[in-house]
Amino acid sequence: MKKLAFALMMVAGFASCDSDDDGVDIPFEGETKEYTLNTIGDSGVSGTVTFNENEDGSTTVEFDLEGTEDGSVHPAHIHMNSAVETGEIVVTFNPITDGESITEVSELNGEPITYEELVAYDGYINVHLSEDDLPTIVAQTDIGGNALTGESVSYDLNEMDIAGVSGVAVFEERENGETLATLDLDGTTEGGSHPAHIHVGSVEDAPGAIAITFNPVNGATGMSMTNIAMTDGTEEEEGEAITYEDLLTYNGYINVHASADDLETLAAQGNMGANASEE
């Protein structure tokens, strides 16, 4: 009987140990997403913003900036849309003090949002100079679906009717399949504004109908940045969705014009998509 009682005690002890092992708490290891904050203008401010998943599904957002001044306080927000489109504020972070800030985010525009939803959101982050100077942006990044994948293609924009004006058009893929299009021209002059479009067909078959309108090229900088998600619509019907992959094989060419009042004079021109190899 003593041996039986001892054996039962041993079994109970092993069962107790197994129960304790099963009940051990495993530390939560959430997902993490980091974005690079790019310097805007000559601010000298750059850094990272990291989204960390919490166990309850919310997100802890951490800023780590370089180039800020001692004692500086920079407001920061998530805005809807991409940075080139601009949009309203939907999340306000705790101010970035001496380059650092930590904020727990569980709502967006007053509605609940999870980590998974936030890292897929159609938005961008602005870091402002100060509470008294919100229009001045010191650092910025697209986030979520607007983040760039690293895939890109460039097309030459050749000199046409205006001597010395030429450059490139760079198309960059976003996570959501849309495109950040950057026109970068040399030879433009301050005060100028140059309309630009993607036309149907090739340079050799021009003129073709306008399919997509870029933001005008700023003569002072020679730059234009446009988010492309749709073709141009008409009064009768909306445009059609167009992805980065669609643009790679699109039957089109790019025209950059002298001005809105002089569309006939071309500043630069180049084939793109399926026609790029024709040059």
Image (cartoon, helix red, strand yellow):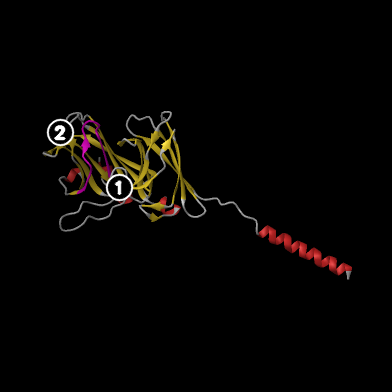
Above or below residue 170? Residue 55 is below
* Residue at disc 2, secondary structure: loop
Q: Quadrant of residue 270?
A: top left
| Residue 91 against residue 97 in the figure, above or below | below
- Residue in front for this viewpoint, 38 or 62: 62
Q: Is residue 213 magenta?
A: yes
Is 162 part of what is drawn in magenta? no
- Horizontal placement of 24 versus 16: left or right? left
Q: Is residue 218 above or below residue 243?
A: above
Q: Determine which residue is flagged by label 2.
A: 161
Marks 2,1: beta carbons within 8 A = no
* Bounds of the magenta segment: 211-226
Residue 108, x across and y down, in percent: 38, 52
Neighbour tally class for label 2: few under 14, some 14-19, many 20 plus, Cα within 10 Å: some
Numbered label tally: 2
Residue nearer the viewer, 62 or 208: 62
Residues 121 and 107: in front is: 107
Quadrant the N terminus occupies: bottom right
The residues tagged by marks 2 and 1 sit, at their Cα atoms, a distance apart of 40 Å
The quarter of the displayed image where residue 269 is located: top left
Indicate which label's residue lies in the foreground, 2 or 1: 1
The answer to which of marks 2 and 1 sits earlier in the sequence is 1
Which numbered dot is residue 88?
A: 1
Q: Provide residue 77's location: percent of width, then percent of height.
A: 36, 43
Q: Name the element at disc 1.
A: loop
Q: Position of residue 130 (x, y in %)?
A: 35, 35
Q: Residue at x 15, y 56 (%)?
A: 235
Q: Nearer the viewer, residue 83 or 126?
A: 126
The disc label shown at residue 181, or none: none
- Looking at the rendered image, the quarter that the C terminus falls into is top left
